[in-house]
Amino acid sequence: MAEKEKNDVQAEGSGGKKKLIILIVAGLVLLLGIGAAVYFLFLKKPPPEEKVKNEQVEMVQPPADEEDTIGPMVDIKEFIVNIISEEGTHYVKASLTLEMSNEAVLEEADKRMAQIRDAVLLLIGNKTFEELQDLQGKKQLKAELKNKINSFLKTGRIKNVYLTDFVVQ
């Protein structure tokens, strides 16, 4: 009988140890969960918001002496470009004239006409319907076109961009 009591005590002791271990593990899991919740809700900084870049290109005014003389002109034939719109399909039908700084750049522009037309089509195609509706948007587009085309011309530069035909529909 003494052995039976000894076995019962051992059985109760090992069962009590199991319960104690389970309670400790459960308590640790609960504490970790509470700690994680506190960290994510109160201590963690929110991720930085992505700033929308609104690139503004400055319109550079040529010096007064350059305004007096009109440089050679290059016409860019009529083209049609789909533009960005949430309301449906919109497009721009336009023709441009580029005023050059000298005769040498006129020849270079003729050679690079495919590159110039590509730049024009890509810049206009990335504009929204709303941007191209108002005067400021058109001025912005002219400045961007001038800067983009001047970036790859080597023998001179574009003095001005003239919108000879511009329909947004």
Image (tube, rainbow, N blue to C red):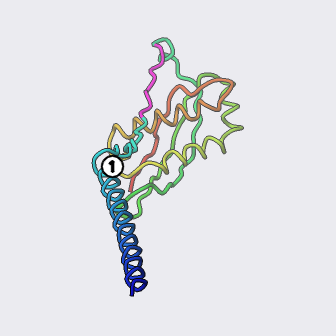
Give left or right: position of 133 versus 164. left
Q: Is residue 122 above or below residue 106?
A: below
Which portion, as a residue range, is magenta?
Answer: 56-63
- The residue closer to the viewer here, 20 or 93, is 20
Q: Let me know if residue 113 is in the magenta part.
A: no
Q: Is residue 66 above or below residue 14?
A: above
The residue where tag 1 is placed is 39
- The residue closer to the viewer here, 143 or 15, is 15
Magenta span: predominant SS is: loop
Q: Position of residue 126 (x, y in %)?
A: 48, 49
Q: Let me know if residue 59 is in the magenta part.
A: yes
Residue that lies at the very extreme toward the bottom in this rendered image? 1
Point 34% across, 37% down: residue: 136
Point 59% across, 22% down: residue: 101
Give left or right: position of 94 versus 134. right
Q: Quadrant of residue 137?
A: top left
Point 58% across, 43% down: residue: 119
Category of crowding for the residue at label 1, using alpha-carbon neighbours closer than 10 angstroms: few (below 14), some (14–19), many (at least 20):
few
Q: Position of residue 15 (x, y in %)?
A: 38, 76
Q: Position of residue 114 (x, y in %)?
A: 66, 45
Image quarter (top left, top right, bottom left or bottom right) of the C terminus: bottom left
Q: Is residue 92 above or below residue 140?
A: below
Q: Secondary structure at mark 1?
A: helix
Point 40% across, 35% down: residue: 139
Tell me the amino acid under the disc marked 1.
Answer: Tyr
Q: Quadrant of residue 108?
A: top right
Give left or right: position of 120 versus 131. right
